[in-house]
């Protein structure tokens, strides 16, 4: 009887150990599953928080870009300033598109996850509202910028017209100035030539002359190209490269003189310009 009782105790002990081992394994399995779930949820949570932080930073940079745009459009806009505004607008639009897409994906991920976090949902709702407001602001700013752009284009056209008018006036003034200068040069233009009697006769500047007659000036058609044109205000000395010289045209004798250099060559010196050219604009000198 004692042996039979011992056998039943043994059977009962083995059965209890077997049942305990099965429950223990099941508990371990459930524990591992919970750990994996927690780790998955933690990873998922970190990813969501990273996206939210990125969107928060984007909204901050969007505000800075908005501040620049508002400052620029409230002041005198230039073409370069408008170009910078367009760049900022493109930057804002790109950021909004990216953030809206990320936020939509984040909302779907939260809906399909095991996470139920009210604070995160509120943050998503707030950011969604912010991005919607930014989108409306972009539309309004774009309208204002287009209006400014039209104003600048219209003003540029007016400036171009004014510039063209100014250029035309400048051209007219330059033409008038040149005409006045030319008239001034023409008024003060005089002519001179010198040469031997033979040379001057060959040019029909001197004609005739003999034993009982004096040569005459400009008798008939003479070679006007032989004369040198000068501004009488600027030329008061004429080197003659000869040792003898006689003024043949009608010029007051007291208004000029001759001087001789170390080689014996003469130079005509006009002492009184107004008086010298008062009777004739042509000067003919015979040298020899």
Image (cartoon, rainbow, N blue to C red):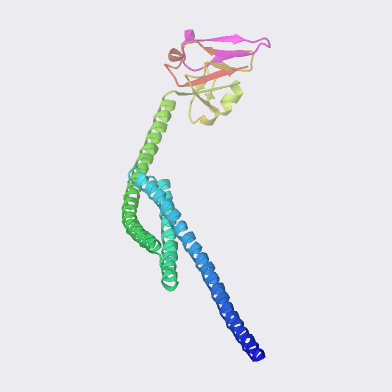
| Residue at 31 percent of width and 53 percent of height | 144
Position of residue 138 measured from the top left corner of the image (x, y, whole percent)? 35, 57
Q: Is residue 263 magenta?
A: yes
Q: Quadrant of residue 281?
A: top left
Left-right relation of 51 to 118: right
| Residue at 47 percent of width and 57 percent of height | 54
Position of residue 156 measured from the top left corner of the image (x, y, whole percent)? 36, 47
| Residue at 35 percent of width and 38 percent of height | 169
What span is colored magenta in the figure?
245-268
The quarter of the picture where the N terminus appears is: bottom right
Question: In the depicted view, which residue is nearer to us: 46 or 262?
Answer: 46
- Residue extending farthest to the top is 254
Q: Is residue 19 magenta?
A: no
Position of residue 60 measured from the top left corner of the image (x, y, whole percent)? 42, 51
Left-right relation of 78 to 260: left
Question: In the depicted view, which residue is nearer to us: 1 or 193?
Answer: 1
Q: State whether residue 210 appears in this view.
A: no
Question: In the depicted view, which residue is nearer to us: 286 or 153?
Answer: 153
Q: Quadrant of residue 287?
A: top right
Compared with 235, 32 (above or below) is below
The quarter of the picture where the C terminus appears is: top right
Left-right relation of 11 to 170: right
Compared with 120, 165 (above or below) is above
Position of residue 10 measured from the top left corner of the image (x, y, whole percent)? 64, 86
Compared with 270, 118 (above or below) is below
Left-right relation of 220 to 242: left
């Amino acid at each position: 009887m004692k042996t039979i009782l011992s056998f039943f105790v043994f059977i009962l002990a083995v059965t209890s150990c077997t049942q305990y081992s099965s429950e223990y394994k099941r508990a371990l399995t459930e524990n591992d599953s919970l750990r994996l779930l927690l780790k998955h949820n933690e990873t998922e949570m970190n990813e969501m928080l990273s996206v939210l932080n990125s969107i928060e930073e984007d909204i901050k940079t969007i505000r800075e870009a908005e501040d620049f745009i508002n400052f620029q459009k409230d002041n005198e806009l230039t073409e370069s300033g408008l170009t910078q505004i367009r760049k900022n607008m493109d930057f804002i639009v790109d950021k909004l598109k990216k953030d809206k897409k990320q936020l939509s994906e984040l909302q779907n991920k939260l809906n399909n996850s095991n996470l139920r976090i009210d604070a995160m949902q509120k943050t998503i709702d707030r950011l969604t509202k912010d991005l919607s407001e930014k989108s409306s602001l972009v539309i309004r700013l774009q309208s204002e910028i287009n209006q400014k752009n039209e104003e600048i284009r219209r003003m540029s056209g007016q400036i171009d017209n004014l510039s063209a008018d100014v250029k035309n006036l400048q051209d007219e003034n330059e033409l008038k100035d040149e005409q006045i200068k030319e008239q001034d040069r023409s008024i003060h233009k005089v002519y001179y030539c010198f040469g031997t009697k033979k040379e001057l006769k060959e040019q029909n500047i001197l004609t005739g002359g003999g034993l009982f007659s004096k040569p005459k000036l400009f008798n008939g058609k003479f070679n006007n190209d032989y004369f040198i044109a000068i501004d009488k205000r600027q030329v008061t000395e004429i080197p003659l490269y000869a040792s003898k010289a006689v003024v043949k045209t009608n010029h007051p004798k007291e208004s000029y003189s001759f001087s001789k250099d170390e080689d014996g060559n003469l130079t005509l010196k006009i002492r009184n310009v107004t008086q010298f050219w008062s009777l004739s604009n042509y000067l003919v000198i015979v040298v020899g």
